Image: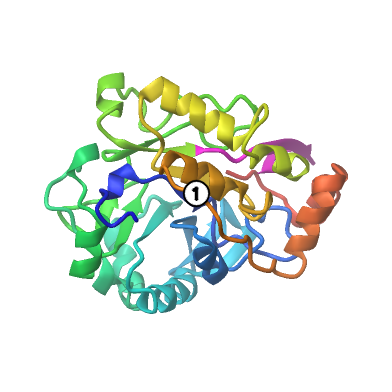
Amino acid sequence: EFCSRKYGNITEVSAHNSPFVKSGNAAANQALSVTTQLNDGIRLLQGQMHFVNNTPHFCHTSCDVLDAGPITTYLAEVYTWVSTHPYDVVTILLGNGNYSKVDTYVPFIQSTGLVQYAYEPPIIPMALNDWPTLASMILSGKRVVFFMDYDANQTSVPWILDEFSQMWETPFDPTNRSFPCTVQRPPNLSANDAKNRMYLTNHNLNYDINVLGNSLLVPNIPLLNITNNITGDGSLGVSTQDCVQAWGYPPKFLNVDFYNVGNGSVFEVAAKYNNVSYTRQCCGLAVSGVGELVRAGRSAGFAVGAMLGSVLVLGLL
């Protein structure tokens, strides 16, 4: 149904910190593997990278907090999925946690095989209406879009796109259920310029806890059913509608934690703004331990705090 539509004119669900699926770790943001995420309909995979012994890993602010392993392991799994789903377009947003030169990541990403599918834009930067249709991306085979938040260099590495010159974000790591649809990154972006770009809404509610003098931000699990809902104060449905009213067009990406909570409600919100109906069953089986944490958190607010003393020692994004 979307083949004739432009990449920038489709609303999709994003897995906030997609690689961070870790049993027994309160810093986890997702309950399901990346293969399951993609099978369920997630189309933006986002995660932050840090170097460990000269190898980039996906880590949550610090690898002492949550280390999801080398990026090559995760991206190789994405490659397997992409190579067996020739009619799907996937976006990968790489967080450059060390602010390293983009070139240092290239050999690691190349080793996964994904670069053969990487989309290279014809102009820099791409405005909202410059993006190709999904059909053209699929026919060309260039159907994986890489973004990097900081220190991308499209002259040097044209297939890793600079995020903030082509897409803006609402406030990240929100702890306030109001979820304002305002531009936080890049800073000082004018309203006119913002309206000419895609945007990502960070609709993932965080829990600010002080442990041993450290201020820690972790997913607010007790409110997930509300946060991921279609209706109600603080829901994804309401905040997306607020964005449409404020900007005149819907977000490109809805960046959520534990997307499976709500039995597909986050996909229903995206479907509404794509003018289609969401009729699939959702979602895949949770990884052991993480799923239990999510289920416990929905019924008891102590689930997050109970794990912090032994698991988390540093602040989180």
Q: Is residue 112 visible?
A: no
Q: Tag 1: Cα neighbours inside 10 Å, few (<14), some, or many (≥20)?
A: few
Residue 112 position (above or below residue 271):
below
Q: Is residue 262 visible?
A: yes
Magenta stretch, overall SS: strand
Query: Circle 1 sits on which residue?
Result: 277
Residue 118: x %, y % from top left: 26, 65
303 falls in the magenta region:
no
Q: Residue furthest left?
A: 122
User: 147 left or right of 278?
Assistant: left
Residue shown at 70% from the left, 66% from the top: 286
Image quadrant where residue 221 sits: top right
Residue nearest the viewer, comparing 87 with 123:
87
Residue shown at 36% from the left, 78% from the top: 83
Residue 89: x %, y % from top left: 34, 62
Residue shown at 47% from the left, 75% from the top: 77
Residue 162 position (above or below residue 35):
above
207 falls in the magenta region:
yes
User: 223 left or right of 72?
Assistant: right
The magenta span reads 202-219
Q: Amino acid at mark 1?
A: Ser
